Image: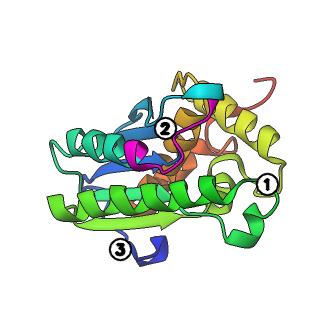
């Protein structure tokens, strides 16, 4: 299922949304579509071994992710939305095959646990679509975009601790705006005075 397949709901319908920026160090955000702000946090599925390297096979990382996801399903959210995997060509020469395989495995684990628990809608969104919604552009360099996402969160009063939480909150905001398009105005400086520079 793609985010475009998520049905638009009436604004009066509250949906519990769990948004995940998935990696070995994962950011998550959760709240109802009618909430002003989500709850959010960070979890690290791996611990560094000898030489500061992550576990090679990923099995320990996957097991930790499975256990964590089980704790996030009480209550079971209506929607799980996860940041999409980048296409292999986008990751070429920027990361190792081991890291790519671990990330793909984490996606499988998280989605499978959600499906088994009865999450009604499991979907994903690209990083570009999330950033276009949340900060108004998809063309910034990675570090600049992450900084701008965190700044936007702080401007909204969402006191994120790191870019993982910031990205998860942006994904949550994106999902909320699909359910209630009026909510997208909340992150636009045009309609939200809090976000205007030099206000």
**Mark 3 vs mark 2, CA separation in Å:** 25 Å
**Mark 1 vs mark 3, CA separation in Å:** 35 Å
Height in image: 54 above or below 14?
A: above
Instruction: Indicate left or right for 32 with 89 as reference.
Output: left
Height in image: 52 above or below 90?
A: above
Give the mark nearer the N terminus: 3 vs 2.
Answer: 3
Q: Nearer the viewer, mark 1 or mark 2?
A: 1
Closer to us: 26 or 37: 26
Which quarter of the figure has residue 28? Answer: top left
Disc 3 target residue: 7
The stretch in magenta equals 52-61
**Magenta-drawn stretch, dominant element (helix, strand or loop):** loop
Circle 1 residues within 10 Å: few <14, some 14–19, many ≥20: few
Question: Dividing the image into 4 quarters, which one contains the C terminus?
Answer: top right
Q: Nearer the viewer, mark 1 or mark 3?
A: 1
Give the mark nearer the N terminus: 1 vs 2.
Answer: 2
Is disc 2 placed on a helix, strand or loop? strand
Closer to us: 30 or 189: 30
Disc 2 target residue: 27
Disc 1 target residue: 94
Give the mark nearer the N terminus: 1 vs 3.
Answer: 3
Q: Nearer the viewer, mark 3 or mark 2?
A: 2
Residue 97 visible somewhere in the drawing = yes
**Position of residue 98 measured from the top left corner of the image (x, y, whole percent):** 61, 55
Circle 3 residues within 10 Å: few <14, some 14–19, many ≥20: few
**Mark 1 vs mark 2, CA separation in Å:** 21 Å
Residue 33 visible somewhere in the drawing = no
Say whether residue 58 is magenta: yes
């Amino acid at each position: 299922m793609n985010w475009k397949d998520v049905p638009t709901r009436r604004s009066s319908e509250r949906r519990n949304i769990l948004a995940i920026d998935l990696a070995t160090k994962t950011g998550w955000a959760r709240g109802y579509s009618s909430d002003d702000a989500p709850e959010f946090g960070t979890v690290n599925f791996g611990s560094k071994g000898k030489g500061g390297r992550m576990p090679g096979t990923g099995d320990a990382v996957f097991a930790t992710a499975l256990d964590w996801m089980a704790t996030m399903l009480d209550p079971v959210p209506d929607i799980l939305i996860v940041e999409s995997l980048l296409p292999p060509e986008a990751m070429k020469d920027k990361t190792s095959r081991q890291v790519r395989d671990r990330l793909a495995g984490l996606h499988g684990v998280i989605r499978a646990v959600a499906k088994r628990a009865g999450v009604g809608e499991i979907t994903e969104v690209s990083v570009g679509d999330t950033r276009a919604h949340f900060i108004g552009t998809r063309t910034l360099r990675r570090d600049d975009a992450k900084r701008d996402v965190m700044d936007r969160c702080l401007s909204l009063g969402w006191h994120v601790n790191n870019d993982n939480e910031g990205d998860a909150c942006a994904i949550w905001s994106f999902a909320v705006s699909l359910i209630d398009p009026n909510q997208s105005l909340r992150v636009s400086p045009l309609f939200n005075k809090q976000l205007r520079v030099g206000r």
